[in-house]
Image: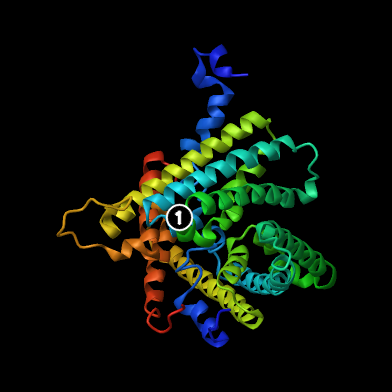
Amino acid sequence: MNTTNPLILLIATIFTHNIALVYILGMCPFIVISKNFKTALGMGAAIIFVVTLTAVINWPIYWLILVPAHAEIVSYLIFIVVIAATVQLLEMLIEKFFPPLQSSFGIFLPLITVNCIVLAVLLFMVLRKYDFVQTIFYSVGTSAGWALAITIMAAIKEKMMLISDIPKGLRGAGITMIIAGLLAFAFMGFAGMITLQ
Amino acid sequence: MSPKKTVKRSLKHTKWFKALTAGLWQDHPTFCMVLGICSMLAITNRLDNAIAMGFGVTFCTVFSSLFVSLFRNVIPGRVRMLAYMVIIATFVICVDRFLKAYFPPISEALGPYVGLIITNCILMGRAEAYAIKNGPLLSALDGLGCGIGYTFMLVLMALVRETIGFGTLLGHRVMPGSWVNWVVMTIAPGAFFLLGVYLWIFRTIAKKTEA
């Protein structure tokens, strides 16, 4: 088992090992949804919620059912089915019980099913052998780190749209990549703080 | 079966040819649709990883498109996403096991990124945009085209990043001894910048610009 302190894990995954800017995951929504600050914030909140929930559900499934049964080979299948089911369930619950949340939060849920981060958190959790408490901190930290990155990106892009004259070919995805590169540089400034295994 | 023999003269105008080449230039998964960026940026700092990843993705696109298309009449509309994911995951498991068995060092280097082929948007995108509406053979060709287009892009990125970042190519030293490695190219910022520049070049050439 991994012996990293959960709190260190939380800080590390937000700053030094940011999943968007260091591991480069979850890029599709990062490019498409980062046009508007409010939308990005909603997407970030939805991600934090879903990632934490699926990690908490999948940890016992993997370590208490799949490992004793020597069925690790189907873990990918189980993970995605559980993710899809959780997201679908969540969508239905929100539609039924919290209709006001639907427009700000619910519309992002179908997108999350195919988001790399949700699966990536599960795969890293298995790969690094986190225990249950570490898993909770790891998933919260990772998704919060991603939400932080996308909101910064959205804020920069919103301002940029107002003032700048970008070359035609660079508009859209191109400039997003360049900004992400600069952001990744900025986040490298944290790198000396913590080393994760 | 082979349509190439029967319509040899106008090969360029058959739907088969179109299905194959759409993914190579016109609807190139990276440049036009900006899909599948995650794994692309993360693993292209070494050429051998990029090639392995390209083969894995191509294998998965071909077979998942083929099978989605075969089952397209029995997949209910509401749960089709789940059906795609199960089909895709099956082939990703094949790739994962294959790499673990025959290329353990590459499997080690790619780590969780092999499993993440499942959530590579290209696979889902091709299933939803093409395979669910077209016949199995055409879908497989379309998948092959997209897979090759994606592999090409991976290799293009890895060529630059490994040469400049490590001074090597497939592990062999190619740069002169006095070369100082640009470490930035091997990590995340370099990947972002390089893709940004590629997108810029391509979109300027193809005149595909966004407002």
Rendered view: A190 above or below B176: below
Residue found at the very far right of the displayed protein: A96
Q: Nearer the viewer, residue B107 or A87?
A: B107
Residue of label 1: B106
* Residue located 79% across and 65% down the image: A89
Look at the image and tell me in which quarter the N terminus of chain B lies.
top right
Residue B78 percent across, percent down from the top left: 79, 50
**Up/down of A98 relative to B168, above or below:** below
Secondary structure, mark 1, is helix
User: Please, which chain is the residue tagged with disc 1 on?
Assistant: B
Q: Residue at x 70, y 75 (%)?
A: A56
The one nearer the camera, B86 or A106, is: B86
Instruction: Please name the residue shown 70% across and 36% down the image.
Output: B69
> What's under tag 1, amino acid-wise?
Ile
| Number of residues whose C-alpha sits closer than 10 Å to that of mark 1, classed few (under 14), some (14–19) or many (20 or more) | some
- Asked if one can make out residue B154 in the rendered structure from this viewpoint, the answer is yes
* Percent of width and height locating residue A152: 49, 73
**Image check: A188 left or right of A196?**
left
